[in-house]
Amino acid sequence: MPHDPGADFRALHKPGDPFILANAWDAGSARMLAGLGARAIATSSAAHAFTLGRHDGGTISRDEALAHAADLVAAVAVPVSGDFENGYGDDPETCAETVRLAAEAGLAGISIEDEDFAANAAYDHDLAVERIRAAASAARSLAGDFVLCARADGVLNGHYGMEEALRRVRAFDAAGADCLYVPLPPGMQSLKNVVRATDKPVNALAAGPFTRFTRADFAAAGIARISLGSALARVTQKVIHDAGQMMFGPGDFTILGMGLPGAEVDKLLG
């Protein structure tokens, strides 16, 4: 029987015992993260966009995202999930087709958010739910397992508050989502409220103010998985930024002596 990465990925989702879903941006970063102990890898729409010299938010096409994800799938032996923005289309059938194509690319799951990039707004509640319902139906029709994460991004983007986010979490759950995600709610108590709103696994984002919490803190809140989003890529960008300021300003190269030895990189790359 063919190996099913979706089943392996689903088994990692244990509320109260979260795994770290490590977002990578190329084959090298994916291999390093897996070599360091990541049990699953994810793409990051923002980090991928940065590698192409673009900003985040609807600048990556579905074909580009699928090809990028396939590169990461080929690079590592752990499950890979795709950060597939809004499913690359407004209508439910496009979201369903994105799920089918993601599975063909070897992905163990994807996340789909409720952001309408063209309108700079959240999708209407009912449309947002129908989009997840169609994606979940497509996921259940696949030959293998597939973990669909439904994102309520309106709090992050300033389009609605926590009351609507929780309403959407409950509706996405009922529509068939396997995992629920409200990126960067106002605080840990709000995150706990997301967990209480569903019996399904909940994803938390280790970014911004939530970086002060530990894995144990997220576990105590009932979180099942912790993703990094573009945070690790932004740390890498800060190193480039700081090195550039030192080199092109006072001509100081000392920061370059702080790099990881080549032998250690080679070892992690396998």
Image (spheres, rainbow, N blue to C red):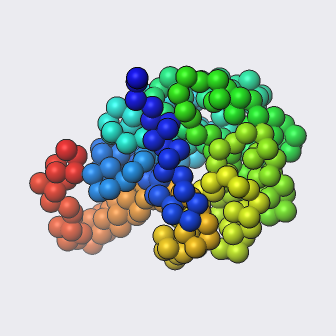
> Which of the pair 204/195 is nearer the observer?
195
Measuring from the top left, give residue 137's x and y in whole percent: 71, 29
> Which of the pair 22/222 is nearer the observer?
222
Image quadrant occupied by the N terminus: top left
Measuring from the top left, give residue 166's x and y in whole percent: 80, 58
> In the drawing, does residue 118 fall left or right of residue 40?
right
> In the drawing, does residue 42 fall left or right of residue 236?
right
Residue 59 at least partly seen: yes
Residue 153 at least partly seen: no
**Residue drawn where x is 27% and y is 72% of the image:** 250
- Examine the rendered structure and indicate whether residue 110 appears above or below residue 138: below
**Residue drawn where x is 35% and y is 46% of the image:** 30
- Examine the rendered structure and indicate whether residue 2 appears above or below residue 200: above
Measuring from the top left, give residue 247's x and y in whole percent: 27, 65
> In the drawing, does residue 187 fall left or right of residue 252?
right
**Residue drawn where x is 54% and y is 52% of the image:** 13
- Examine the rendered structure and indicate whether residue 266 appears above or below residue 96: below
> In the drawing, does residue 195 fall left or right of residue 167?
left
Number of marks present in the image shown: 0
Image quadrant occupied by the C terminus: top left
* Residue projecting furthest to the front: 1
> Which of the pair 71/64 is nearer the observer?
71
Measuring from the top left, give residue 68's x and y in whole percent: 44, 33
**Residue drawn where x is 80% and y is 64% of the image:** 162
